[in-house]
Image (cartoon, rainbow, N blue to C red):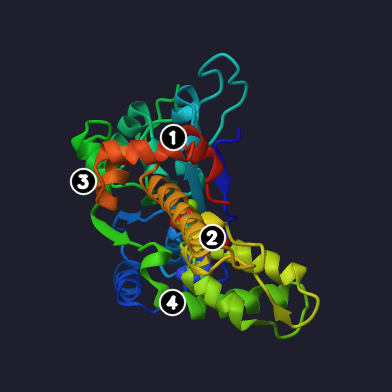
Amino acid sequence: MSSTTTAGLRQPIEPFFVGQVPAVKTALNLVARIAATRATVLITGETGTGKDVIARLLHARSDRADRPFFAVNCGALADSLIESELFGHARGAFTGANAQRAGKFAAAHGGTLFFDEVTSMSPHTQSALLRVLQSGEYCPIGSEQTMVCDVRVIAAANRELRELVSAGSFRADLFYRLNIVRIHLPPLRERREDLAMLIDHFLRVFADRYDRGAMQLDPVSRRQLHDYDYPGNVRELETIIHRATLLADGPVVSVEGLLDPASAPAAACAPSAPLGSFHRDKARMVEKFERDYLVAAMRRSRGVVTEAAKAAGLSERNFHLKLRKYGLGRHTLLTDCSPG
Ligand SMILES: Nc1ncnc2c1ncn2[C@@H]1O[C@H](COP(=O)(O)OP(=O)(O)O)[C@@H](O)[C@H]1O
Ligand SMILES: [Mg+2]
């Protein structure tokens, strides 16, 4: 069954969360205060902001650290299999159940279950999870035996869960059960003060991994990395530095050609060489700016034009006209630009 990822039974090495801005300090303070409790935690933040790292940190700093940690990807769970996946089944419980099978709750007994991407959890799965959170007990399918659930539950969401609750696609009662402690991780573009630390951290990580000795970034690359927008957040930065270290000939690393131009607003500010007429160059620059801006705005709003137009301070009609002018459709934008 491919619906879950296993993080291994023991977590001897504590994950390291790099960052110092106030929002990160708040998050790490919360981790320190609640890691040892059994409280359910909801971690929110865009993709790549470090939700997995925080979940593992909570586990590693709890008295459950030597017990299992399992991550369950809620989007990947098929409805028909979910209960057996989570709670297990008795032999003969249904066609094809040739042997008894333990579910994730049993496998993680005494440890932590991490429900990733809860926003994509089906209504059926939401009910199943709510039941076990409320009663603290569950029955494997086809079994009479009630099992006591001793699992700490951590959930992660990359969208505003509260909005899904208001829209009726996420159960309010489950939301309140999960949202006992909430840890929010800001997108990387809102914590640029941490960039230098993160860049140096990843340079060290990959230099070590590939036995490259000390590596450093050339100054132009450093400036480009500071101006970049990071739609894929820390994960994207990590991948960029990973590639750059692999491609470097010597100890100096360059990110030349590794950044997505649509997310590098600074690139639009340099006059194109060789110089043409002022007006033609200016028009070209404005066009490039407009196109890049539209792509970034649409990407940030995940393709919702109303939202993108509002954030841009343009009327929806004007925004539509501009999209059409550059041949940008919702579909091309979302497939073009999905972060690495
Ligand atoms: N603050 C951080 N310090 C160090 N590495 C980080 C940090 N945040 C994210 N990462 C790294 O970035 C990648 C993506 O993080 P992850 O926790 O999987 O993000 P998410 O679950 O929010 O999508 C991982 O390889 C992780 O190790
Ligand atoms: Mg994740």
Q: Quadrant of residue 336?
A: top right
In the image, 269 versus 39, the foreground residue is 269
Which residue is at the front of the view, 301 or 47?
301
Above or below: residue 234 compared with residue 84 = below
In this view of the protein, can residue 135 be seen by the observer? no
Task: Point out which mark residue 194 bears.
Answer: 4
Amino acid type of disc 4? Answer: Asp
Q: Secondary structure at mark 1?
A: helix
Q: Is residue 67 above or below residue 5?
A: below
User: Which residue is pictured at 49% across the width and 74% down the height?
Assistant: 226
Quote the CA–CA distance across marks 2 and 1. Answer: 24 Å
Q: Position of residue 222 (x, y in %)?
A: 56, 78
Mark nearer the viewer, 4 or 1: 1
What amino acid type should be assigned to the residue bearing mark 1? Arg
Question: In this picture, is 65 found above or below 203?
Answer: above
Separation of residues labelled 4 and 1 (CA atoms): 32 Å
Q: Position of residue 93 (x, y in %)?
A: 50, 19
Q: Which mark lies nearer to you, 3 or 4?
A: 4
- Kindly identify which numbered label has been placed on residue 183: none
Nearer to the camera, 273 or 85: 273
Which percent across, then down, holds residue 321?
Answer: 36, 36
Q: Which residue is mark 3?
A: 176
Q: Is mark 2 within 8 Å of ligand 1?
A: yes
- The quarter of the image holding the N terminus is top right
Q: From the Cβ of disc 1, is ligand 1 less than 8 Å away?
A: no
C-alpha gap between disc 3 and disc 1: 34 Å
